Amino acid sequence: MRFATLAEWLSFQEQLHPVGMDLTLERIALVADRLGLRDTDGPRTVIVAGTNGKGTVATRTAALLQAQGLKVGLFTSPHLLRYNERIRIDGDPLSDSALCRAFEAVDQARGDDSLTYFEFGALAAAWLFRDAGVAVQVLEVGLGGRLDAVNIWDADVAAITAVDLDHQTWLGDSREAIGREKAGVMRAGRPVVLGEPEPPASVLAHADHLGARAVRSGRDFTLTRSGAALQWVWQGQSHEWRLAGVGARIDGAALLNTATALAVVESLGRGAGLTEAVVRQALEISAPGRLQRLRGTPEWLLDVAHNLHAVGELARWLEAHPVDGPVVALVAVMADKERTAMWPLLEGLVDAWVPVPLDLPRALPAGLLADELEAAGQGPVCRVDGVDGALSEAARRAGPRGRVVVFGSFHTVAAVLEHAPALAPAALSGRVEPDWPDGEAVHAV
């Protein structure tokens, strides 16, 4: 074996390819075929693309299938604290030794062909899923869709969540252009679940041109909410479902993403298995760091929101879920992100701001972020030294009845969890505390 430890393998992968991002499929497809990872004997495949929500949809889809008794592989990115979070079988991260074994297999198969860090991981995930005999592999797109590494597999069911502006350098500077890239995960004659009620016209046009079977939110599956009760209804599919009373914690983007995951499972032909017990069990699992509420004094809310659409969802959630005490934002953003339109969305919802100093070349320095927030009329803005100082200041200002909101990037959430070990286990488990008021149920009709 080339290396004995996971850390050595990951360091090697970071330096192997001349560029960190190389949006082509030829090299990874060649290596996948050498490994026999694309023949018809493999697992069924679900591919989830989108600007926001794809991690949640992928995680919930896997949980719904696993709760039905299927063996399920899940590949997501990025990770928060450990690379192992990216590759899971039946919800459990793979061990270091299993990952090293997969990396060795990929390394042997690639020969003189170089692979990017993400391509190496995607191949390792697929190899591990084959080795374990999973029934379904759920693959989250890393960037875009058409030229993303996971798109070398033909999705039995594809899903596209909310489409918005992000990564414009690679994907285009409009929703239509970005939607066209994400539509590349569709396959002719196969279902594509569109979780956004009004997707870009380019997405619909590509589905029509290709002959993909579009399953649309608002048409083929609809959802309404009344108070604490939720209701999803599928129309035009092989099943009609009503799910009522799953608790007020499922709302906003989480509601849409959960409904999308249910539609994916139904489109995969597993709708009959969506029993009350299955749905209840699956709804206890969510993707870490996505509007993740950790109870305590103060309460902590972790959200990797790092673009305008995601921050808008965060603002709507905060408005719908007030607390008795102050709300303090622990925030850090990458310097290449569009930020100026984010801050007004949180006007009146944040009582104090604490920029987090991140030791990353891409991160906007905390001092410059503080200047930017003050110039935008936000405040008070607290300038602190180090992540530990930011955590202490945020908790002090929030007090026992307040809330600390951590957002702006995966790196922001990761830094907080690294420096707050008491929060990390609950956050990384992705487990949501069940909240099922008496008399409420999930049932088929």
Image (cartoon, grey):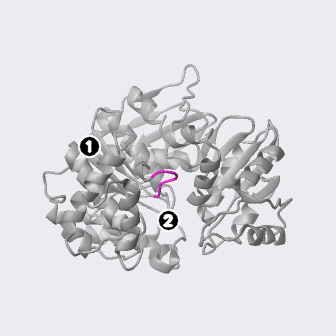
Q: Which residues are magenta?
A: 78-82
Nearer to me, 173 or 266: 173
- Image quarter in which the C terminus is found: top left
Q: Secondary structure at mark 2?
A: loop
Pointer 2 local density, CA inside 10 Å: few below 14, some 14–19, many at least 20: many
The disc placed on residue 139 is none
Q: Amino acid at mark 2?
A: Val
CB contact under 8 Å: marks 1 and 2: no
- Would residue 394 appear left or right of 197 to someone viewing this image? right
Q: Position of residue 45 (x, y in %)?
A: 27, 53
- Would residue 190 appear left or right of 282 to someone viewing this image? left
Residue 91 visible in the current orientation: yes
Total marks shown come to: 2
Q: Position of residue 77 (x, y in %)?
A: 44, 57
Residue placed under numbered mark 2 in the picture: 163
Q: Quadrant of residue 382?
A: bottom right
Q: Position of residue 105 (x, y in %)?
A: 21, 58
430 in relation to 174, above or below: above
Residue placed under numbered mark 1 in the picture: 269
Q: Residue at x 28, y 58 (%)?
A: 103
Q: Earlier in the sequence, mark 1 or mark 2?
A: 2
Most frequent secondary structure within the magenta stretch: loop
80 is within the stretch colored magenta: yes
Q: Secondary structure at mark 1?
A: helix
Q: Residue at x 65, y 44 (%)?
A: 420
Q: Amino acid at mark 1?
A: Gly
145 is within the stretch colored magenta: no
